[in-house]
Image (cartoon, rainbow, N blue to C red):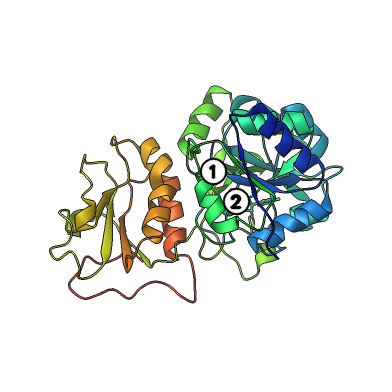
Amino acid sequence: MRINTLTLSADKPDDVARAAAILAGGGIGAVPTETVYGLAGDATNPAAVQRIFEAKGRPSSDPLIVHVADLETAHCLAQFSPVADVIAHAFWPGALTLVLPRLGPIPDAVTAGRPTVALRCPAHPVMQQLLRTSGLALAAPSANPFGRLSPTCAAHVINSLGGAIDFVMDGGSAGLGLESTILDVMDHPVWKIYRPGPVSSETLAKWAKSAGFDPRISDYSGSHDDTVESLPAPGLFGRHYAPRTPLFLVRNGSAINRNGKEDPEEPKQAVVLTGMGGEQSNPERGLFVCSTDGSLESAANRLYEILHALDSGTWSRIVFEMFPEGGLGTALNNRLSRAAGSHEHDNPRTSWPEGDAQPVV
Ligand code: TXA
Ligand code: MG
């Protein structure tokens, strides 16, 4: 059943108050955060949580991140070890999600029945205002149909979830453009990164040293197991963050024709270069650059925007140059690999026309 999805503006105080009231009444809506847009609902209301899963088509085995206004609220929802507390003090509000032992009023549906809950205190002023005005903890996965590209602006959400949710709050472009880093320090001094993100392992390591910790930080984002239930972060399996258009990745783009295609019609291939070498876009020749200023920050800000735009065009395939590893580059490559399906067992995208650059996957 399609419903009327209101478009609200983050610039209008009445609209923000209206969104908060809808959420408090058990409704669900897309809200801007500093990472990507989230699909928010009252985390303590099982009916609202159920609607989030339905609107996204998300399996009930994949738990949701809960967003809180501050650390004080977080303390009511999860048990913080001393190290978790210091990390939250240092990185919140911000793009870091902590997986912690769950407490109190969070229903099973949010955590997929797990004994843990993933918590984040977002920095975005509109999301902060919604959390404070509504007085709620908000469950908010990325506001996209399950497995698809995350949204970085209101239009992305309207195109995919319009008619399935109560409102979309337009707050402009999500600044960082990549989902939060997900960190588990429950086995301190082993720190597990389930999803690399804007807070990189290098940043965490540097900060840990300055704070007097000596953790072993390991990347669990590529780990797999037989069943969803046994995965450390169940959303991190299979193809995800994916465009519909076949996506191929190339490492070391020297093999790509950096001038674009010779014949604009054949094949209808879009090539995306990192932009780290100062290349220029040439859309007529099917050539695009991700970073506009040579920085990884600009690349992260534009990654999903470019994939959304190319995916809504008539390209037969997208060839994407991978980023240098390290820092945000690790997070960018993680999303690209997942979008290309290189972590998928049964349908790897390995077919590749002869004579072209060899894909990584
Ligand atoms: O930046 C973000 O984190 C965005 C914005 C909206 O805050 N949210 C987001 O949520 O990316 P979502 O649902 O798309 O991704 C959350 C990931 C999923 O892979 C899920 O499996 C994992 O977090 N997760 C949630 N709860 C967990 C838990 N208790 N233990 C392990 N992983 C968990
Ligand atoms: Mg997501």
Q: Name the residue at 51% across, 38% down.
A: 174
At which x and y percent is residue 226? 62, 71
Q: Name the element at disc 2.
A: loop
Asked if residue 206 lies left or right of residue 236, the reply is left
Task: Answer whether labels 1 and 2 touch (C-beta < 8 Å).
Answer: yes
At which x and y percent is residue 53? 70, 59
Image vertical order of residue 129 relative to residue 163, above or below:
above
At which x and y percent is residue 198? 49, 38
Asked if the beta carbon under badge 1 is closer than 8 A to the nearest atom of ligand 1, the reply is yes
Q: How crowded is mark 1: few (under 14 residues within 10 Å), some or many (20 or more)?
A: many
Q: How crowded is mark 2: few (under 14 residues within 10 Å), some or many (20 or more)?
A: many
* Residue topped by disc 2: 143
Q: Can the viewer see residue 191? A: no
* Residue topped by disc 1: 36
**Front-lying residue, 14 or 192:** 14
- Mark 1 → mark 2, Cα distance in angstroms: 8 Å
Asked if the beta carbon under badge 2 is closer than 8 A to the nearest atom of ligand 1, the reply is yes
Image vertical order of residue 8 relative to residue 304, above or below:
above
**Front-lying residue, 89 or 176:** 176
Q: Name the element at disc 1.
A: loop
